Amino acid sequence: MITKIARVYVVGIFVIELLLLLASLLVHISVRMGFQKLDEEFGNFLIAAAVLVCFGSAAIAKDRNIRENEFASCPWWVQILVAAFALYGFSMVISHIMHSADAGSSGDRLRASAMPLGFDALSLCILYAALWTNTVQDAELVKRSKISIAALIIGVTMLFFKWNAFFPHPVR
C-alpha cells in the first residue's frame, strides 16, 4: 500500500513537472515572439516552481549522481531531449549572469524565461528513470519519496515566507 502511494506521488510530480515544462516552453516561445505579457504574469512563478520541484525530484535520485544513474538509464531520445533543454536553459542562465548590466532589456526577459527549462528537463529525467527504468527498488522509492516530500514542504514554506511575511517586498 505504501509503495503504491509512493509511486502515485512520483507520478503526480512527473505530471506536474511535465505541465511546468510545457508552460515554461509556452512562456519562452511567447517572449521569443515578442509578447511579454505571459512572462510578466507567470515568469517568476515558473522559475520558483521549477526550482522547487527540482529539489523534490533530486531527493528521488539514486546516490545523487544523476548523470551516471538516471540519465544513463533513460532511452536515447529522452537523453537527447533532456540534454537539449538543459544545455539551452543553463546556457541562457550563464548568459543572463554575464549580461546582467542590461537589465530590463528584451534580451533579459528572453534569458530569464529560458531558466526554468533546464531545471524542468533534469527533473523529468530523474522522475522518468525512477518510474520506468527500474533504477529504484520499491522500498527505496518509499524512502526517497518521504525525503522528497520533506524537501517540497521546506521549499513551499520558504516561498510562503518570502512572498508573504518575513522577507521585505520590493517597492515598485
Image (cartoon, rainbow, N blue to C red):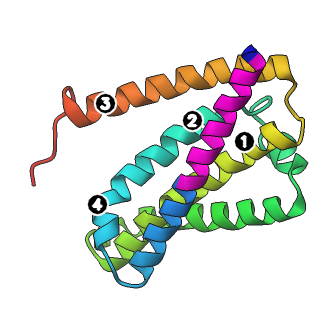
Direction left: furthest residue? 171
Q: Which mark is residue 127?
A: 1
Would residue 18 be found to the left or right of residue 101 on screen? Answer: right
Mark earlier in primary sequence (3, 2) = 2
Q: Do the CB atoms of the residues marked 3 and 1 lie less than 8 Å apart?
A: no
- Give coordinates of residue 74: x percent, y percent: 86, 51
* Residue 94 seen in this snapshot: no
Expressed as whole percent of the image width and height from the top left, the position of residue 111 reads 44, 69
Residue 160: give its label.
3
Disc 4 marks which residue?
41
Q: Is residue 150 visible?
A: yes
User: Which mark is nearer the camera, 1 or 2?
Assistant: 1
In the image, residue 159 sits, relative to residue 35, either above or below, namely above
**Alpha carbons under labels 1 and 2: distance apart:** 12 Å
Q: CA distance from mark 4 to mark 2?
A: 23 Å
What secondary structure predominates along the stretch shown in magenta?
Answer: helix
The secondary structure type at the circle numbered 2 is helix
Query: Is 7 part of what is drawn in magenta?
Result: yes
Q: Residue 96, labelled with which disc?
A: none
Asked if the residue at tag 2 contacts the one at tag 4, i.e. Cβ–Cβ closer than 8 Å, the answer is: no
Q: Which residue is mark 2?
A: 55
- Residue positioned 52% across, 53% down in the render: 20
Q: Residue at x 19, y 27 (%)?
A: 165
Quick one: label 1 or label 2, which is nearer the N terminus? Answer: 2
Of circles 4 and 2, the one toward us is 4
Q: Earlier in the sequence, mark 3 or mark 1?
A: 1
| Callout 4 amino acid | Glu
